[in-house]
Image (tube, rainbow, N blue to C red):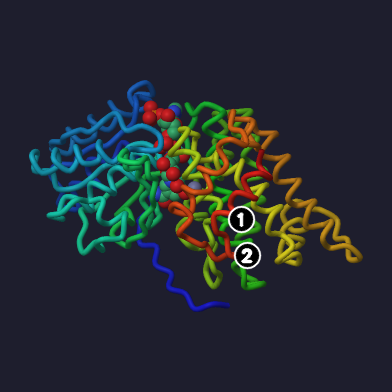
Amino acid sequence: MNNFIYHSPTKVYFGRGYETKIGSLLAERGFRKPLIVYGGGSIKRSGLYDTVLASLKEAGLSWAELGGVQPNPLLALAKEGIARFRAEQCDVLLAVGGGSAIDTAKVIGLGVPYDGDVWDFWCGKATPKAGIPTTVILTIAAAGSETSQSAVITNEDGMLKRGLNSEFNRPLFSIMNPELTYTLPAYQTACGVVDIMMHTLERYLTLPGEVELTDRIAESLLKTVRTYGPIAIAQPDHYEARAELMWAGSLSHNDLTGCGRASIFINHKIGHELSAKYGTAHGASLAIAFPAWAKYCYRSNIPRFAQYAVRVWGCEMDYAKPEATALAGIAATEDFFRSIGMPVRLSDIGIGEAEIDDLASRITAGGKNVIETYIPCGKQEFAEILRLAL
Ligand code: NZQ
Ligand code: ZN
């Protein structure tokens, strides 16, 4: 087991009705004026927006707003949010939505106390030294941003989609009412299912070998999502299914499933470039990346991939040919992604051979970066992985 630091300080209010208390939850912490950050309109259609404003009014709070955050959120809008937060003299961020709204709020939270360009943090020129707290009302089980230390943003200048880990990114508290996810389209629910699984797999299919407790937590989480994902897709108002997914989404990315292990996040690197260049939904981009990456790398860790196949997918262990078991687990994952309506090939989203070189170049910063996983992956290796995804 590797050394690790585990710190997941976000307070979680989980279950029906907590969103009606948002006003008092902010007021009792001494906040007077949140900047509400939200997306393209789902919270207005569902009535959540009205619920939030009523609760703020009742608690005697005022507020300012930043709406219009798009999936795979853009830096320019976050910068607009930094200016608005300052001009309106807000004192806390309230993201109402999914990863895109939450991450935009986190960018604003780091940008407000900083004199320079907030992108400095994402391109490695500076390290955050302070942050305005972000609070959350979650409407989609997917990114895990509601408890994670990450924030992912795309700089329109070059369409660079980058993540930043910082303890200042951990939300102060998150309200998670599974009912708020009933209105999700099946496609977004499925994207969330893939993303949740991938946050665990990017920590599980790594070196070192077994870390028993962490492995068992990860496997339980994956099996839970495998069971309840299709139920939530078939019955959008199935409370227990939505609740299982929502809690899995947070635990998958608050670092619990990685304690004592390395994490790789190589599929996320591939996925981010698909999202940045083609606007592919985050979960869908991972459903394409994983089968190809796994087929490329599994030979470097056959026992691990075989364990995954047996424990998560119930594949029979072939002791004479463990490689066959490893491959069966990869095939089961791919079949599952396909069964919930996800693309699993680049061709499923209209991308062909002609794009491979540029994508591999973007993943490796123009061929400069080599990413260490099982096999060190530079531009050539990524091109080979992408070809397996064609
Ligand atoms: O914009 P609105 O109108 O709200 O619609 C959204 C959006 O179109 C819709 N939606 C959300 N909740 C809904 C709903 N529609 C109906 N009913 C509801 N209850 O769903 C669409 C997707 O929303 P988004 O916030 O983009 O989804 P998600 O949570 O998957 O976030 C994706 C973003 O998070 C990043 C991704 O890269 C991507 O940019 N990630 C952030 C991470 C983090 N901060 O820790 C980790 C992840 O790996 C991921 O990279
Ligand atoms: Zn993700």
The amino acid marked with disc number 2 is Ile
- Tell me the SS state at disc 1: helix
Residue at the image position 60 percent from the left and 31 percent from the top: 233
Q: Is residue 9 above or below residue 87?
A: below
Q: Position of residue 205 (x, y in %)?
A: 63, 61
Q: Is residue 304 above or below residue 267?
A: below
Nearer to me, 291 or 174 = 291
The amino acid marked with disc number 1 is Glu
Judge: label 2 CB < 8 Å from ligand 2.
no
The answer to whether 121 appears left or right of 147 in the picture is left
Q: Nearer the viewer, mark 2 or mark 1?
A: 1
Task: Quote the CA–CA distance across marks 2 and 1.
Answer: 9 Å
Q: Position of residue 216 (x, y in %)?
A: 65, 64
Ligand 1 quarter of the rendering: top left
| Residue holding disc 1 | 381
Residue at the image position 57 percent from the left and 41 percent from the top: 356
Residue at the image position 60 percent from the left and 45 percent from the top: 289
Q: Is residue 89 above or below residue 256?
A: above
Judge: label 1 CB < 8 Å from ligand 2.
no
Nearer to me, 191 or 19 = 191
* Circle nearer the N terminus (2, 1): 2
Quadrant occupied by the C terminus: top right
| Residue holding disc 2 | 375
